[in-house]
Image (cartoon, grey):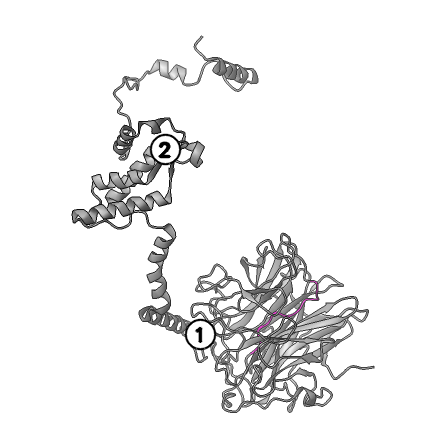
């Protein structure tokens, strides 16, 4: 029989199943045209030899008992000791050690024990010390330590690179030049954009490069103020259950970076606005109608500017609690601000802190700009969205807040935040678009909405240099950390639908909320008019992705008349849906007044009719 038993059974099974033929296909062609010389070795093929085989044989000659030791028994699938010995000899020879010395050192690093051969650190060190002693007696220079610690070796190699990266003046100069080149490219791309000149009482509508630091672009629309944001986007987060993304338990809120606050005629640093005490705010008067949160007292961390409200409502069996994260800046800060927290029991009267928050239940400043020069958030931090949800990327035993701002941070109490770095080299979650794309200049104001488990949507804005208008982009994510851009939202009537409309120059700072009763999506956005003044519009969509349609051709909230605290513009909307049969909506926003004075206001809808909002004037009994 020409087959072994196993081969015969295998062939028989294949024949029975019809998977093989009685004669192989290659047999007849081989019989018709056999090869001239059949490839047989005849013992002439030389065995393969490795460079260390010489030293393996020498090891076996000196330690013949090692041939009978099983390395698996004492070191879990380690190579045989002879191979370890030979490999070390070759490593030492590459360092310039003579063969005799390399053999001696490699042999000293192996310890023979009754249960086999194992490596011992103390024997290795003793061997190196003995070799150095012999070298000193013989007058020869010992080689470097042949077996340095892997960790120490890596640290020694990385230390000069780290030092050069952070402290080398040449590297810092190169980084500065790169930033200037990027700013120059952006200015070149904006030359073709002809913004109208602002009137005496309107906001400056110059190009996004007209800031003091030309490298970065402000996070709001036309009036790019001193408060700046990096052109890449980072996000903050927090989570509850470890494996599933959970829905935000509170009504959806806003995720917008506040609009700018500078004018050409007045420098806020030279003429800072005088703050109004909370006791002096009377929303029923015409000058302060709708104002619920004014500047802090002189010397406070938010005495010069406030805005970008992110409001959340939390309900329990015995109480109602409101949290508001907002942007603030003091008189002493030159270009950047901080994020603060205020609390309330009704969403109107707020408790605030005048300095940095110092307790787990306190209020005040909770986050400042990043201190590392290479990070993405060294110029500005403004809150855009706060959510309570879960992710398999962020595990915790209790509720965790996710803070989306110009970056990403997490917290367990909403007060103490830890930044999360993204895949971008600066720590951002994703970068601006490539050259020629609509969002290649900057991306700002990320607002995140929970749609379903494993489906998060982010809305952000940028400036489209081709269309010369601001627009809203959308991205999706499964875990809230890695995002995929879907492009710019293109809908009829959303942003510059007609000449002279309130959003002729485009839309920014979108705040998207899912209607808990109907199931559709509402988007409150900031429209930029031709003269640079901002108003708030509202659009609806069935799925939150496409077919966004404005509820009206007019803005749902416009700047107040002359003399009002928000007469120069309203923006950074934050929608909150109230519970109850009346289906009322609250619209928190940032108002801009004379001398670039800012404040946070409140407007309410007339029942379920969200086509128009009226400024809050007080509770009606």
User: Where, by quadrant of the figure, is residue 596 drawn?
Assistant: bottom right
Secondary structure under the numbered disc 1 in the rendered image: loop
Q: Is residue 67 left or right of residue 570?
A: left
- For the magenta stretch, what is the residue range? 249-259
Question: Residue 250 lies in magenta, yes or no?
Answer: yes
In the foreground, 499 or 567: 567
Answer whether residue 547 is visible to the viewer in this image: no
| Residue 221 percent location from the top left of the image | 54, 76
Closer to the camera, 162 or 137?
137
**Residue 144 vertical position relative to residue 347 in the rendered view, above or below:** above
Kindly identify which residue carries mark 2: 80
Q: Is residue 2 left or right of residue 57?
A: right
Give percent across and percent down for residue 187.
41, 75
Q: Is residue 578 above or below residue 354?
A: above
**Quadrant position of the N terminus in the picture:** top left
Badge nearest the viewer, 2 or 1: 2
The picture places residue 220, in percent across and down from the top left corner, at 54, 75
Q: Earlier in the sequence, mark 2 or mark 1?
A: 2
User: Going by the image, does 113 lie left or right of 515?
Assistant: left
Q: How many marks?
A: 2
Q: CA distance from mark 2 to mark 1?
A: 68 Å
Q: Quadrant of residue 386?
A: bottom right
* Residue plotted at (54% across, 88% down): 199
Q: Residue 569 magenta-drawn? A: no
> Which disc, if any, is residue 266?
none
What predominant SS class does the magenta segment belong to?
loop
Residue that mark 1 sits on: 190
Contact flag, marks 2 and 1 (Cβ < 8 Å) = no
């Amino acid at each position: 029989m020409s087959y072994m038993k196993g081969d015969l059974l295998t062939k028989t099974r294949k024949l029975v199943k019809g998977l093989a033929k009685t004669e192989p296909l290659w047999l007849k062609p081989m019989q018709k045209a056999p090869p001239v010389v059949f490839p047989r070795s005849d013992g002439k093929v030389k065995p393969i030899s490795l460079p260390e085989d010489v030293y393996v044989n020498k090891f076996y000659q000196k330690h013949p008992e090692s041939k009978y030791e099983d390395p698996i028994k004492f070191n879990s699938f380690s190579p045989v000791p002879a191979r370890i010995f030979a490999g070390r000899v070759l490593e030492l020879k590459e360092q310039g050690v003579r063969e005799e010395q390399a053999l001696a050192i490699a042999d000293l690093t192996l310890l023979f024990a009754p249960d086999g051969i194992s490596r011992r650190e103390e024997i290795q060190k003793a061997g190196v010390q003995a070799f150095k002693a012999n070298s000193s007696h013989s007058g020869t220079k010992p080689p470097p330590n042949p077996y340095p610690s892997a960790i120490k070796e890596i640290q020694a190699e990385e230390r000069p690179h780290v030092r050069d990266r952070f402290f080398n003046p040449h590297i810092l100069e190169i980084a500065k030049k790169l930033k200037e080149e990027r700013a120059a490219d952006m200015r070149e791309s904006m030359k073709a954009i002809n913004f109208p000149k602002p009137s005496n009482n309107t906001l400056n509508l110059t190009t996004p490069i007209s800031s003091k630091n030309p490298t970065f672009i402000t996070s709001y629309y036309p009036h790019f103020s001193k408060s700046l944001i990096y052109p890449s986007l980072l996000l903050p987060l927090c989570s509850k259950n470890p494996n599933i993304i959970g829905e935000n338990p509170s009504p959806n809120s806003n995720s917008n970076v506040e609009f700018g606050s500078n004018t050409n005629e007045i420098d806020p640093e030279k003429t800072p606005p005088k703050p109004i005490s909370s006791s002096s705010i009377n929303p029923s008067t015409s000058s302060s109608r709708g104002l619920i949160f004014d500047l802090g007292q002189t010397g406070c961390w938010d005495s010069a500017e406030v805005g970008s409200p992110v409001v959340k409502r939390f309900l329990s069996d015995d109480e109602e609690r409101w949290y508001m994260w907002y942007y603030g800046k003091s008189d002493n800060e030159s270009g950047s601000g901080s994020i603060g927290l205020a609390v309330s029991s009704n969403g109107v009267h707020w408790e605030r802190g005048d300095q940095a928050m110092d307790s787990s239940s306190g209020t005040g400043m909770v986050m400042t700009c990043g201190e590392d020069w290479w990070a993405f958030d060294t110029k500005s931090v403004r809150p855009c969205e706060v959510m309570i949800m879960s992710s398999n990327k962020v595990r915790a035993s209790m509720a965790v807040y996710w803070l989306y701002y110009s970056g990403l941070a997490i917290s367990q109490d909403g007060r103490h935040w830890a930044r999360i770095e993204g895949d971008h080299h600066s720590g951002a979650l994703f970068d601006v678009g490539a050259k020629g794309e609509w969002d290649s200049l900057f991306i700002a104001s990320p607002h995140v909405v929970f749609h379903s488990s494993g489906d998060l949507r982010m809305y952000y804005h940028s400036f489209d240099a081709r269309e010369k208008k601001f627009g809203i982009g959308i991205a999706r994510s499964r875990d809230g950390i890695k995002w995929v851009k879907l492009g710019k939202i293109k809908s009829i009537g959303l942003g510059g639908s007609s000449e002279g409309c309130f959003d002729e120059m485009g839309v920014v700072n979108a705040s998207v909320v899912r209607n808990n009763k109907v199931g559709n999506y509402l988007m409150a956005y900031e429209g930029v008019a031709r003269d640079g003044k901002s108003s708030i519009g509202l659009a609806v969509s069935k799925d939150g992705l496409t077919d966004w349609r404005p509820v009206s051709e007019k803005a749902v909230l416009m700047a107040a008349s002359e003399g009002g605290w928000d007469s120069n513009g309203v923006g950074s909307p934050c929608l909150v849906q109230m519970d109850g049969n009346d289906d009322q909506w609250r619209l928190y926003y940032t108002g801009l007044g004379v001398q670039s004075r800012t404040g946070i206001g409140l407007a309410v809808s007339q029942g379920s009719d969200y086509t128009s909002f009226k400024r809050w004037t007080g509770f009606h009994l």
